[in-house]
Image (spheres, helix red, strand yellow):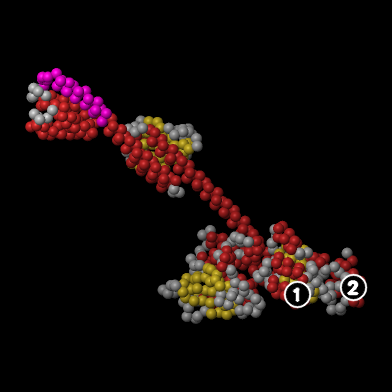
Amino acid sequence: MNMGRHVLIVEDEPSMHQVLRLNLAVRGYRVDTAVTGMSALGLARRRCPDLIILDLGLPDIDGLEVIARVRDFSAAPILVISARDTPAAEMAVIAAGASDFLLKPFGIDDLIARVRAALPLDACLGERSGGLPGNLPATTLRRATAAAER
Amino acid sequence: MRRSVIGSAAALASMALLTAAMLPLRSHLSIATTALILVVPVVIGVVCGGFGAGTVSVIAGFLVYDFFFIPPYLTLWVGAPQNWAALGVYAAVMLPVAHVVAGMNAARTRARRREREIRELFELSDLLVEDKPLDILLSVIVTTLADVFRSRQVAIFLPGGDGLEVAASAGDPLTGEELRRVLPVPGQVASRHAQSLARNGLLVVALAAAGRPVGLLVLSSDAAARYEREPLLLFANQIALAVERAQLREQALQSRVSEEMARLAKTLVAAVSHDLRSPLASLKASSSTLADPGLDIGPDAGRRLATLIDAQADRLTDLVQNLLDMSRIQAGVLQPRRTITPLAGLVRGLVNDMAQGLHGHAVRQEIPDDLPPVDIDLVLISRVLTNLLENAVRHSPRGTAITIGGALTAGAIEVSVTDRGPGVSPDRRAEIFELFPRREGDAGAGLGLTIARTFVEAHGQRIWVEDAPCGGARFCFTLPVAAPAQEEPIPEEGSVAADSRH
């Protein structure tokens, strides 16, 4: 059910995007990463991801600016992760067009839950185990089904 | 008294002179003319000696006039009735004249004295409105008072310790006996308004501002009694105002310092928590992935995550250590532990250690081998270089190179770290080393540059950023050249990050 779901991770901290990429890939998502705002915009335009995970603290342009520019051409949900914990920061992010805000540090299960919430499962696919590729670990399959049933 | 004697002498001398001059011409001069001329010595006498001398001159003039110029000459007998009139008028007019002239003279002297006091008061108030420290003001005040009031002893007492203490004094110091007589009993309020009391040869003036007692002014009263008390009270008010102002200034400074410190603490907490959150976020994400019972990511991925956790833990440890070092340096507790080392070796070792952290960016080292060695704290300067490199890595586009250069300039070694990123605009060049981000987004810069600056400045050197020729940023800092005479063992390359934790 996560097949073909394409996630773009925009995060300049290499250790962070390694962990995120690992977690998403093992759950069946296709992952692209960008380390700067400009390259993120380029990738988003070309590859049309289904979800963008965006870190606010980018070296070249401000995260809010990235959100605004992405909204020019894409309605894909944007999940913002940030170390800024002021209520004003969170409000600004949502107001700019992001769909969710997650404060660092966060548990990976929290992130995955929000990713799933942002990308509703395709109910039809979830019921047919035959439609799934064979190379997914059984545990992932079990968890995903359990989640779909909740 | 002396003045009277001088005056009388001057009058008599001038009288003798004029008489001698007039005698030969006696027959040509009228009696009135003689009288008029004999006015001159009286005026001289009064001007020089005051009313006393004036009186003496009038009597002398009367006698001389009668004796030498009123017939019959050389007797005191007066012949004709109109000559009685002349003599009478002379005496009757001269005495009041002497009195008036003496009065005018005294008034003029008083006016000059008052003018001087006012001028001194004006100069003093001019000084008092300047922002000078209290102790300097007080010492000028006591000197001026001693001068203007010609006082042998002047002292100002201000509250301090338990009771009043001497804050400034001029002339002879007051003896213990005198102090006991003058100072009020501790706990007793001397006065709420400026007023002066004479106590056993000393004049005590209470200093008060806004109805609040501020201190005491003590003068030896033999001098002060000669003058009216008013100018003294005027001075006392000025002094009280100056003391109060200095005290308020002190209080304002204190509260400004507390405000600054509170602001610094708040910003430091924000910057630290931001810098701590990044490695913590990677740590948390990695560990929660590994801890997930339902997830099987495979041993390779598991090891990768464990390595990541390890690296982030190191990063946090470094950060904490650097913050501690920075606060110790700023408190003056930590001193750099200097060693002599060649720069090229230090940089090589550091770049090797950083390997992973460079994320594929090549590091070009342009440090001449014949550069003189530097005299630095290895741990602190390694941190400076690491922070600058991490900053360059963070801002460099993928695949671009970072250049580390070293050159000898003006008695110091200048080290530069150049990247090909977006550069730093001129208006932000000073700010980025500061702890206070002026704009919301700047918090992302973290503490790395602030720490670098603290460590560089602990060596008495400076750090700055300029434009790189290729458009990126060029961070530079200076390091002290090792003095050639000292011979110390040079540490091996690679042992830089090592052991010398403070």
- Assign a secondary structure to mark 1: helix
Question: Which amino acid is tagged 1?
Answer: Arg
Q: Is residue B266 left or right of residue B166?
A: right
Residue B16 relative to residue B299: left or right: left
Q: Position of residue B440 (x, y in %)?
A: 65, 61
Left or right, residue B156 beside residue B247: left
Q: Identify the residue shown where x is 63% and y is 64%.
A: B442
> Toward which corner of the image does residue B236 lie, by quadrant?
top left
Whichever of callouts 2 and 1 sits on the residue coming sooner in the sequence is 1
Report helix, strand or loop for mark 2.
helix
Q: Which residue has dot 2 on it? A: A125
Task: Say whether residue B270 is left or right of residue B152.
Answer: right
Q: Who's the residue at 64% across and 72% down the image?
A: B394
Would residue B99 be counted in the magenta stretch? yes
Q: Residue at x 9, y 32 (%)?
A: B25
Q: Which mark is residue A45?
A: 1
Q: Is residue B49 visible?
A: no
Q: Amino acid at mark 2?
A: Leu
User: Which range of residues does the magenta coloring cover?
Assistant: B76-102
- Please identify the residue farthest to the bottom as the structure is shown: B369
Is B286 a magenta residue?
Answer: no
Q: CA distance from mark 2 to mark 1?
A: 28 Å
- Of residues B69 and B498, the one drawn nearer to the viewer in this rendering: B69
Q: Residues within 10 Å of mark 2 (few under 14, many from 20)?
A: some
Residue B331 higher or lower than B240, as above or below = below
At x 40% / y 38%, what residue is drawn?
B235
Residue B34, position as x, y percentages in the image:
14, 29
